[in-house]
Structures are given as structure tokens and as C-alpha cells.
Amino acid sequence: MASAHDRAVLQAIFNPNTPFGDVSDLNQDHDERDDDSSFDANLLRRAKDLEERGVSAAETGDLQEALQMFCQAIQVLPQRASAYNNRAQALRLQGDTEGALEDLERAISLSGGRGRTARQALVQRGLLRRLAGQDDKARADFQKAAALGSAFARQQEVMLNPYAALCNKMLCEVIDKLRHPHVSANDL
């Protein structure tokens, strides 16, 4: 079995755009699940069912039906973050970026910045902020989502960090020289 250091080296070789030592399976000691233990079990089942129906509707392109299902799920359990995150996605697909950002803020707040919903909401908010040219805010969201286990957010964070990109480029060049020690710069 490979050590953590060995996996980090392999990660650097096969995924040179990620920071050295950033192995997606490492540091996974956080709990990915949302904490729904405080909700009434019957209300939770009802809200989850409505969300599943909303996701299904969105997947078939029926955004109006999806929004209705997510709104109903919010009515059933207004303190549960997941439905706000899902509704934000439907709003974004309809072009309502402002409404999506409001729902993402609510999802992040309700989740306490923990769990799967927080991770997804942070990634989505980071993407919307990046599209709006708010790179510093986007980077902060991606950092938080990466800390919650999002490999995609980790990649986005690296892409927004020019120093990390430069270090990765230099590391790639060193690794390439190690792979091909007899090839000079003039041969390339």
C-alpha cells in the first residue's frame, strides 16, 4: 500500500495542475453528510421526497415544476439547507442569478458551513462569483469547499492562484527532466 507521500508524488505526476501534496483521498476525515437529526422524521421524509421530485423535474427540463417542488420542500422544512441549494440551481438555470445567490447564502448559513449541502453551495456560489469577475470571493468559496472535500473546488482554487500554477509548472519541468535526463533543451 502506498504511503501518503507516495500518493502525493503520484498525484503531482499524473495531475500536475493540483498543488503538490494535494491528494483527494487524504484529509477526508470530515463528515460529508448533512446533519438532519434535529428534524422531525416525517417532515424530513416529505421534504426529501419533494426535493427528489424537483431534481427529477429539473433533469427533464421542467424548471417550473422543479421550482414548485423545491419551494414546497422549503415550506415543509424551512430550516433545512438542501432545498435552498437545489432551488438555487433551478433559479440559476432560469437565469435568475440574484435569486440563486440569495438561496445559496441561505443554504450556507443554515448548514453552518458543514456537510454536503454547504460544499455544493460554496462551489456554486464560487462559480457564480467567478463569472461575475469576483475572483477573490470565488477563491475564498473554493477554499472552503475544498476543505469540505470538493476536488472540483480544489482545481478551481489552483486555477485562480497564479503562484500555485507557477509552482506546478516548475514541478512539471523538474519531473520531465527526471523522466528524460538525456534530453537537452536544444533537443526539444
Image (cartoon, grey):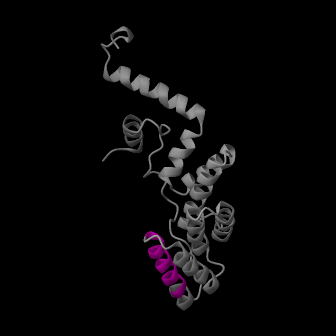
The image shows residue 36, relative to residue 18, as above or below, that is below
Quarter of the picture containing the C terminus is top left
Nearest the camera: 28 or 61?
61
Nearest the camera: 74 or 26?
74
Kindly tell me whether residue 38 is visible in this rendering: no
Residue 75 location in percent, x, y? Answer: 64, 84
In the image: residue 174, left or right of residue 183: right
In the image: residue 105, left or right of residue 18: right
Residue 77 location in percent, x, y? Answer: 62, 83
> What's the magenta bit mostly, secondary-structure-wise?
helix
Point 50% across, 59% down: residue: 29
The image shows residue 154, relative to residue 183, as above or below, that is below
Write the start and end of the magenta stretch as one range.
46-59
Kindly tell me whether residue 176 is visible in this rendering: yes
Residue 54 in magenta?
A: yes
In the picture, residue 43 is in which quadrant? bottom right
Residue 153 location in percent, x, y? Answer: 53, 50
- Looking at the image, the residue that sits furthest to the top is 186
The image shows residue 177, relative to residue 10, as above or below, that is above
Point 42% across, 36% down: residue: 12
In the picture, residue 176 is in which quadrant? top left
Point 44% across, 70% down: residue: 59
Residue 112 in magenta?
A: no
